[in-house]
Amino acid sequence: MSGRYVAFDVETPNFANDRISAIGVAVVEDGQIVREFAALVNPETHFDRFNVELTGITPERVAGEPTFAALWPVLEPLLGSGCLAAHNAPFDLAVLSRCLRAYGIRWRARVPYVCTCRLSRRVLPQLPNHKLSTVCAHLGIPLDHHRAGSDARACGEILRYCLGSGADVDGARRTYDLAARRTLPGRPAPSGKLVRDGIPALIESAGGSCRWETVSGDRYLRLLDEKLAEELAEFRESHTLEELADLQEVLLAAAAARGWTPEDVERARAEKAARRGGFAGGVFLRDGGT
């Protein structure tokens, strides 16, 4: 159980996901959690009601807290000290990337990471889903969900369990391109045909359902249930976002893994549609194939 992993979790103030309102870090070294850090962060931007209800973090709570830029001298040595880990890691990494860009902070172009959601699917395939709350309940890990420090420690504990189980954690490492905000492909890019045919097949194999629809002249794959979110998250990690389709941002891909109920997702989707325009019902993937 050698190696150093840095489990982290971020909470965000709104659906832009380019600022952080809280961050937690748990360092795992030689199979043990050796250091923890958690802080509220003043995001210097507006809060959406949904995020406030989800995290309990209000503008008033963070008014006197340090900004991300002020915390970076503390965070950088921690985040840079090992392989990053997060539960549904592409979400947290994308937020980190956007936040670095928003503050003009130059860091590494690429970082190694492991996703404990992905790992737990391999180690605990019998679970009904692999949300952080579900995995923690199964393993008896205490969790105060959507509190960054608790979520980061829980991620670290899941990682410890996977390491202890003999899972090939090093083999599950991926590389995240912070500039492009995507996981670098670990296999050849799929053809347009795979995008068109492969995703529906994946959904159906997972017991889900979908159908093609035309909206404003564009062809979309409408997902008729929430089960896809977790399965698609793993499928996405192996391909670029452009190759797969437009996922209506990270929110919908991350929803199930972050413990949101279908009602939470529907409310968030409706709020976003009302604010920015978009689809108020269903989850859509645009056909990016040729």
Image (tube, grey):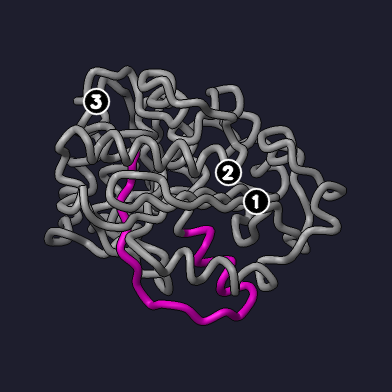
Mark 3 or mark 2, which has the lower sequence index?
Answer: 3
The answer for how far apart the CA atoms under marks 1 and 3 are is: 29 Å
Q: Are marks 2 and 1 in contact (CB under 8 Å)?
A: yes
Q: Which residue is mark 3?
A: 124
Q: Which residue is mark 1?
A: 22
Mark 2 or mark 1, which has the lower sequence index?
Answer: 1
The amino acid sitting under disc 1 is Ala
Q: Which mark is residue 149?
A: 2
Residue at the image point whose x is 26% and y is 44% from the top: 235
Q: Quadrant of residue 231?
A: top left
* Magenta stretch in the rendered image: 94-116
The amino acid sitting under disc 3 is Leu
Q: Is residue 221 above or below residue 112?
A: above
Question: Of residues 90 and 289, which is closer to you in this image?
Answer: 90
| Residue 187 appears left or right of 76 | left
Locate residue 217, reporting x and y percent.
45, 50
Residue at the image point whose x is 76% and y is 39% from the top: 49
Locate residue 55, reporting x and y percent.
67, 37
Mark 1 or mark 3, which has the lower sequence index?
Answer: 1
Residue at the image point whose x is 82% and y is 47% from the top: 61
The amino acid sitting under disc 2 is Gly
